[in-house]
């Protein structure tokens, strides 16, 4: 157990220390504002304040964790050994940077509350992020900082024991449309045929007719493949289904289709099932609740979590809705067009509500690579090398690498050629050798 002294124990402080020390390093931590209690403590201890009390492990605090609301911060990113950090604290501190304030800045998505230019769908662009502007988007800096803290504490307190954590991979299978041609209904099918004819897409028309006449498998139907993969993988996949109303943005099937219901039930026999919130329902709590309840009625158990269509996030309202709906996990935090660590971490973390200044029970599982973001690499070898780089980066801190793919990713389209091989290698990475240094 680590005892931490500070002149004020704020919600932000508890949140940041909780993620670095509890979630990443696996230690128990207690807090005190009583200097006498702190000085009398004989075990490992750290002070987090403006100046040290005695000869304890000391981190010179930045003001961020003692403030409320959003303010103008002077964020100056500097090199720190093999990584970077900000909120420099000078020579007196046992760490040259306030990693707790810096971690809070990234985990709370502080920058996403500040003025920025959203994209066409109202999303925060990776180009607006501090991580992209200073070239550390490809590093889980919060986990790296936590390991630097671990190493410093080991030197000061040699008897401290840190639990081992193990590198893991977590696939998220997103199902915005289960079938490209099958079970569409007569109106949508006729419209699809007419559009193919009008735009001279005869190859699409041919493929559509083959599927409709049961001479070919639907291009999006990769579910037997996924089930077979799941049977060989110890940890269960998370499969998110879109079940909201049909719209311009969401072209999903209806739960009134018996075949779609049967598909969801069959997937739920092997994998965990979550919901994909439709684009038009993201600010409509009543519709979100209805969709959640209908999906839970199909699988006959609570959903494991949710993610938003188009990765759209409206902070803090998107997450407040999930909390009100008693959704415990979300998988929307990430960039659809960039590989990396949007929140700076490869460890699940709790959502901190900046308006109410509270840590919430909603656990955020940010994804670090999406199938579409690998398309910018032309050859399969380039894609595999980039994925391998990401795997090795997360292995160094024994974190969890989250890969977001879609059911159509494993279809026959030339666009996704080779992705079955990439997915297999991703799953196998969990069991590949890890260096002794990383296991310590």
Image: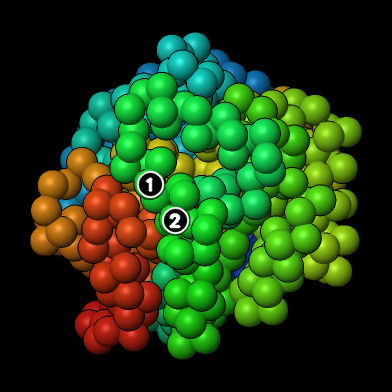
- Direction from residue 403 to residue 245 in the image, left or right: right
Q: For mark 1, give the secondary structure.
A: helix
Residue at image x 27%, y 84%? 432
**The one of 344 and 301 positioned closer to us in this rendering:** 301
Q: How many marks?
A: 2
x, y percentage for residue 306?
67, 50
Residue 354, percent across and down? 67, 30
| The C terminus lies in quadrant | bottom left
For the residue pair 264 and 231, the one nearer the viewer reads as 264
x and y percentages locating residue 366 in the rendered image: 50, 50
Is residue 240 visible to the viewer in this orientation of the structure?
A: yes
Image quadrant occupied by the N terminus: bottom right
User: Is disc 1 in contact with disc 2, using a CB cutoff of under 8 Å?
Assistant: yes
Q: Position of residue 227 (x, y in %)?
A: 53, 77
Please give the name of the residue rendered at 34% of the width and 33% of the height, measured from the top-left corner: 201
Is residue 104 positioned above or below 425 on the image? above
The residue to which callout 2 is attached is 210
Residue that carries the numbered disc 1 in the rendered image: 206
Q: Quadrant of residue 304?
A: bottom right
State the SS at label 2.
helix
Q: Any mark on residue 184, and which? A: none
Residue at mark 1 to residue at mark 2: CA–CA distance: 6 Å
Residue in the image at 37% along x and 75% along y: 427
Residue at x 45%, y 42% (from the top left corner): 334
């Amino acid at each position: 157990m680590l005892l931490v002294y500070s002149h004020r124990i704020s919600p932000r402080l508890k949140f940041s220390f909780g993620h670095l020390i509890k979630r990443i390093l696996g230690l128990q931590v207690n807090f005190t504002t009583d200097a006498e209690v702190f000085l009398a403590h004989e075990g490992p201890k750290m002070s987090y304040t403006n100046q040290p009390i005695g000869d304890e492990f000391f981190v010179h605090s930045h003001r961020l964790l003692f403030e409320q609301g959003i303010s103008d911060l002077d964020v100056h990113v500097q090199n720190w050994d093999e990584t970077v950090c900000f909120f420099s604290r000078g020579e007196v501190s046992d760490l040259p940077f306030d990693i707790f304030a810096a971690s809070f800045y990234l985990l709370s998505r502080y920058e996403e509350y500040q003025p920025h230019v959203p994209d066409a769908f109202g999303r925060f662009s990776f180009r607006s992020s501090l991580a992209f502007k200073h070239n550390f988007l490809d590093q889980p800096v919060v986990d790296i900082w936590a390991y630097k803290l671990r190493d410093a504490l080991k030197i000061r307190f040699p008897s401290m024991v840190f639990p081992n954590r193990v590198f893991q991979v977590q696939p998220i299978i997103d199902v915005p449309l289960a079938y490209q041609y099958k079970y569409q209904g007569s109106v949508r099918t006729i419209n699809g045929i007419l559009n193919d004819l009008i735009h001279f897409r005869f190859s699409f028309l041919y493929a559509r007719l083959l599927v409709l006449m049961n001479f070919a498998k639907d291009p999006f139907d990769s579910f037997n493949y996924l089930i077979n993969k799941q049977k060989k993988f110890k940890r269960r996949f998370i499969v998110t289904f879109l079940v909201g109303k049909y719209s311009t943005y969401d072209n999903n099937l209806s739960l009134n289709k018996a075949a779609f219901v049967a598909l969801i039930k069959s997937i739920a026999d092997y994998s965990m099932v979550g919901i994909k919130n439709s684009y038009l329902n993201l600010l409509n709590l009543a519709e979100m609740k209805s969709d959640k309840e209908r999906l839970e009625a199909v699988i006959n158990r609570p959903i494991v979590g949710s993610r938003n269509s188009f990765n759209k996030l409206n902070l803090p309202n998107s997450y407040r809705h999930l909390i009100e709906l008693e959704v415990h996990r979300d998988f929307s935090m990430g960039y659809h067009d960039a590989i990396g660590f949007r929140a700076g971490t490869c460890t699940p973390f709790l959502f901190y509500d900046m308006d109410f200044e509270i840590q919430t029970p909603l656990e955020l599982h940010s994804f670090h690579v999406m199938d579409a973001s690998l398309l910018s690499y032309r050859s399969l070898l380039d894609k595999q090398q980039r994925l391998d780089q990401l795997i090795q980066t997360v292995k160094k801190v024994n974190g969890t690498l989250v890969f977001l793919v879609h059911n159509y990713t494993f279809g026959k389209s030339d666009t996704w050629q080779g992705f079955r091989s990439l997915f297999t290698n991703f799953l196998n990475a969990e069991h590949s050798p890890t260096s002794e240094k990383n296991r310590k």
